[in-house]
Amino acid sequence: MRLDYDVIVIGAGHAGCEAASAAARLGSCTLLITIDMNKIAQMSCNPAVGGIAKGQIVREIDALGGQMGIVTDRTSIQFRMLNRSKGPAMWSPRAQSDRMRFMAEWRGILENTPGLYIWQDTVVQLCVEQGRVVGVITALGVKFTARAVVLTAGTFLNGLMHVGPVQIQGGRVAEPSAHGITEQLRQMGFVTDRMKTGTPVRIDARTIHFDKATRQDGESDFHHFSFLPGERSKLRQRPCWMVYTNPAVHEVLRQALPQSPLYNGQITSIGPRYCPSIETKIVTFADKESHLLFIEPEGETTQEMYLNGFSSSLPWQVQIEALKHIPALADVQIYRPGYAIEYDFFDPTQLHHTLETKLVKGLFFAGQVNGTTGYEEAAGQGLIAGINAHHAALGGEPFVLHRDQAYIGVLIDDLVTKGVDEPYRMFTSRAEHRILLRQDDADMRLTPLGYAQGLADSTRYELMESKRRQVSSLIDFARSTTVRAADVNGALERLGLQPLKQGVKLYDLLLRPQLSVNLLADMLPALRQQIGMLEAGRREEIVEAAEIQIKYSGYIERESQMAERLSRLDRVTLRGKFDYSALHQLSTEARQKLQRIDPATVGQASRIPGISPSDINILLLLLGR
């Protein structure tokens, strides 16, 4: 039995799985410690991956060589591309997964990764010597040593669940909470607080009147999560269903508010503003007579359904009574009620951009312990923490993604620079360069970085390069090909579009918003032939990528220039240059925040709330800039 490792990962949720997989695949002998091996990569809340901005994160994880996109594609029972009515910077993939197969797929990957071992136990203490982590001690009394440790304990740190007046210690239903680590880290100087999240009731599909709900099917085109071909689900695809609450539902909930832990003082921690409970919705939006709910399948064959939008901590009797006023759920039978859970998290401004803690060398935090919410945000952090834990253990340069490179870079920079005052959820609006961070080009942006790290293999890299060459070839063809008016005017007029007065380049014709490559291919045999020369299995993906680059070239170029100007401040190093408390030229607030956060660069300092442009100018002057 081996007791010494390069990297130890605590927790096998979405952050822990990516961290352990990355560290091991990079060459670190890695130990993953989890309370329950049967709950590896458990989808604690809804059985879905992706969504607005979250889908972009999963595509980035995949492009870097992570596993979440592959696992999702293999276990998907529905796929949709959200926000199609908006520009491509807003398109966001989302998939329903088979919950049990998702966990089984992840466990199979981890168990068969060379150099990666699993131990079922609970970590109760970190071993720290001279400011550096050297291992962990478990509830069974086993001491494992390591050169780096990644903490990804999710909601398990002093987790406490609420169903009405009932309180149960645990990190998830039927799983015990973890104690000891928060208390130890607090004694070492770490700032910690409590957050709250929740999950809805689970419903027996046999008791749902689906004829009184609106069906929502998935899509079956070429889109999916992984950039690798062949990673497609073989599972039966299933629909979701839409229903609405009504005034009768709201009245039941409103009458029961004194029994809600959220409103009677039982819960005092910080809850998520962007994923509120149903009781919060009827209070915050008191004038609304209905709220949309989604009934989502938990798997290919199971009868268990997830009621998205009805998160609640009210007594189970109240939840059922309220649901029965929805026509489709008039005879509802449930598997278990919704519940709220409180748990410990650590102020993420105590981290470097590598996700290594500032107080203890070799100790990394990832996932909900950093105040985030969502599988995708957790997995993105886990991947970065795993890469950097490997470098901390065996030597190597820190790996950091910047805001103009990835949503993951935006996520981590927001956490370590601004901190959190509520559970952090990613949105496209958080990224100032989102036209550069599209889901379609994540491979172009990040696979070279993943390949340089050794995480993305040569097969993935060559697939990316092949796609790049074919996209460029199609764009060059559009730039060099002249379209005669006689070739397209008849079709344009039938479509109600302005005909050409003279020949134009195909590239310029594609700038018309009503026209697409595929539409013009029906009119132009040469374009049809050019498309036919593209790689068969990825033809649609390549055409879409080329078309986006053509139609949005002006926006992309302008955003790239803006990103370059802003990134100059991120190349001016700051850490270790000043004792901020002695810089009386700065405002008092600036001195306090700069001293506490100790930003690595002037760019990071400029993004700290409360740091003014004049403060930044003073720092640049003091640096001789």
Image: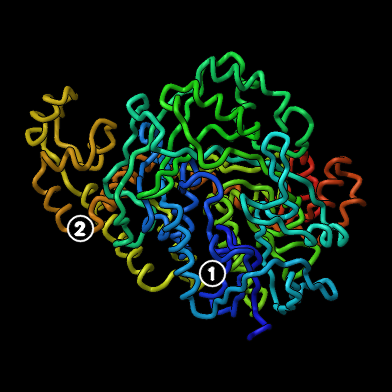
- The one of 364 and 307 positioned closer to us in this rendering: 307
Q: Residue at x 50, y 51 (%)?
A: 57
Label located before the other in sequence (1 or 2): 1
362 over 229 or under it: above or below = below
Q: Which residue is mark 1?
A: 22
- The residue under label 1 is which amino acid type? Ala
Q: Nearer the viewer, residue 312 or 446?
A: 312
Q: Is residue 121 left or right of residue 39?
A: right
Determine the CA span between mark 1 and mark 2.
33 Å
Q: Locate residue 462, reporting x and y percent.
A: 34, 69
Q: Secondary structure at mark 2?
A: loop
Q: Is residue 192 left or right of residue 394?
A: right
For the image shown, how many numbered marks are present on the structure?
Answer: 2
Circle 1: is it few (<14), some (14-19), or many (20+) Cα within 10 Å?
many
Is 22 in front, or is 507?
Answer: 22
Q: Who is closer to the viewer here, 402 or 14? A: 14
Q: Is residue 1 left or right of residue 552?
A: right
Q: Amino acid at mark 2?
A: Leu
Q: Residue at x 41, y 46 (%)?
A: 96
Asked if residue 607 can be seen in this view, the reply is no
Q: Are marks 1 and 2 in contact (CB under 8 Å)?
A: no
Indicate whether 498 appears above or below 504. Answer: above
Foreground tag (1 vs 2): 1
Q: Is residue 509 left or right of residue 173?
A: left
Question: Whole-percent x and y of residue 556?
Answer: 43, 44
Quadrant for the N terminus, please: bottom right
- Confirm whether residue 454 shows in the render: yes
Give residue 92's position: percent from left, percent from top. Answer: 42, 42
Q: Which residue is mark 2?
A: 534
